[in-house]
Amino acid sequence: MLRVMLEDADYCDVPADLMTFDDGVVVFWRDGEEVGRHRQLRIRSLELIGSRPMGRRIEEARKTHPNAFRVWTQEQEDLLTRMFHENATKDELVAALGRQPGGIATRLRALGLLGEDEKLV
């Protein structure tokens, strides 16, 4: 089962075991049959649900980083961008955003603020 997080904090759960990409659309399949499709630009993230090992990992991470593995809101991205431009440290970003350092670095790269070879310090 996949949770498809869409723009505007909307989501849907899709009983899929495979996904393919077709001209800007993500097509979801189960046992060789199409079970759904969404425009790729509308998808913010995909999450495996019902997967016990990942579920435990998320639960553990959220004990110390409450926003770990959650979809980024525009407000969080704005705060991240502002703090990054103000030269906030990695620890300051982690504390303010409630996220893991790796998630913050990944988002900074997606926003074009941190290069692929740069590290969050």
Image (cartoon, rainbow, N blue to C red):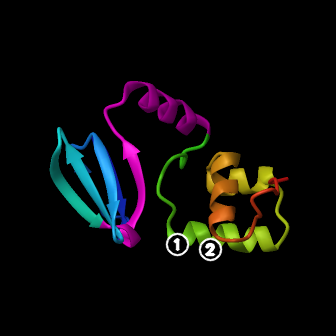
Give the structural element (helix, strand or loop) at label 2.
helix
Relative to 83, is 7 on the left or the right?
Answer: left
Q: Which residue is mark 1?
A: 74
Residue under the point 73% across and 57% down: 93
Residue under the point 60% across and 69% down: 77
Q: Which residue is mark 2?
A: 78
Q: Position of residue 37 (x, y in %)?
A: 23, 61
Q: How many discs appear?
A: 2
Residue under the point 57% across and 35% down: 61
Q: Position of residue 90 (x, y in %)?
A: 79, 53
Residue under the point 17% across and 38% down: 31
Q: Nearer the viewer, residue 60 or 118?
A: 118
Please state which amino acid type lies under the numbered disc 1: Gln
The vertical placement of 44 against 59, above or below, is below
Residue range in magenta is: 39-64
Relative to 52, is 30 on the left or the right?
Answer: left
Q: Residues within 10 Å of mark 2 (few under 14, many from 20)?
A: few
User: Does residue 107 appear anywhere in the picture?
Assistant: yes
Q: Which mark is residue 44?
A: none
Please state which amino acid type lies under the numbered disc 2: Asp
